[in-house]
Amino acid sequence: MSEGSAISIQELVVDYGTRRALGPVSFDVAPREVFALLGPNGGGKTTLFRVLTTAFPATGGRAEIRGHDVMRAPDAVRRELGVVFQSPSLDAKLSVRENLWHAGHLYGLSGRALATRIDEVLALVTLSDRGADTVEHLSGGQRRRVELAKGLLHRPALLLLDEPSTGLDPGARRDLWRQLLELRDQTGVTILLTTHILDEAERCDRVGILDRGRLVALDSPAALKRSIRGEVVTVEGDEPVTLRERILARFGGEATVLHNSIRIERPDGAAFVAELMRAFPDDIRAVTVGQPTLEDVFIHVTGRGLWETEQAAAQEGSA
């Protein structure tokens, strides 16, 4: 384990029978860091999440949580973790406080100490005035914050969240992220989350992009976008494959056809657009130029779109 790391993963591998679902994967997460695992469904995020939460054994390699080996010391690891799963885990017929009371018993808390701790976590997630409300009467965002409160009851050093914004509208998603960043600042908790939502990953200190079980990129969101070294030009035409070939023959470089559009990376996108329109005025219906996004980074390192990969994974899973 790298000294001082909250999470250290070295050459981790997970096989499902003869199929390799993950790895080998290696990276560290620093204390107090907000770290995102970004990738399509089927890319390996959930598999890695299950290993870190001690729910599934790795086939090879090593994973440590604050110095505790996930495979050899699962009980010690669980004491360090607060986990918020993608699927709801609240009893809708119980009140917020009753849900937290039962969860506290699972952590060995009881009596006055538990009551005090429930007051503390409700204050942390700004739900102090909703403790007596039944969960079924809360909004989706409020329910997610109760899930966070459950995960924080035993003062974990590390908070793991699986697709935390699933099912939330944009406003609730913004509120959730405000809560997460405030929690990190107030309590010093390290946060690792899985997501396929690009603007969610943008909010994190660092992002690891997983695709087909491999870590294909790792850095801060800004550094990942700078790796493209230019602007992204998107061209629409009636015959994108043929038009791409003509553009490459005229200008060289690289171009990719995605979603019936041609995607081109250029250091000076605006100047290139002018040249492009002069060269092919009758073949281009529309053209846009913009700064790189994390979606562009995914395309750059995999040759495929994030949503295109998600659709392929869904079709493979239903086949």
Image: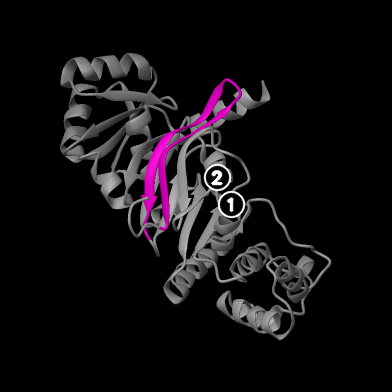
Dot 1 alpha-carbon crowd within 10 angstroms: few under 14, some 14 to 19, many 20 or more:
some
Near-viewer residue (294 or 271): 294
Instruction: Label 1, secondary structure: give it.
Output: helix
Of residues 247 and 318, which is closer to you in this image? Answer: 318
Task: Determine if residue 169 is in view.
Answer: no
For the C terminus, the quadrant is top right
Amino acid tagged 2:
Met
Direction from residue 288 to residue 6 in the image, left or right = right
Q: Main secondary structure of the magenta part?
A: strand
As for residue 14 lying within the magenta part, the answer is: yes
- Residue that protrudes farthest toward the right in the picture: 93
Q: Is residue 232 left or right of residue 137?
A: left
State the image quarter where residue 227 is shown: top left
- In contact (CB < 8 Å): disc 1 and disc 2: yes
Which disc, if any, is residue 71? 2
Q: Position of residue 276 (x, y in %)?
A: 21, 28
Q: Which mark is residue 74?
A: 1
Residue 315 percent across, percent down from the top left:
61, 25
Identify the residue at image location x=25%, y=38%.
Answer: 228
Query: What's the magenta region?
Result: 6-30
Please indicate, yes or no, whether residue 90 appears anywhere in the rendered image. yes
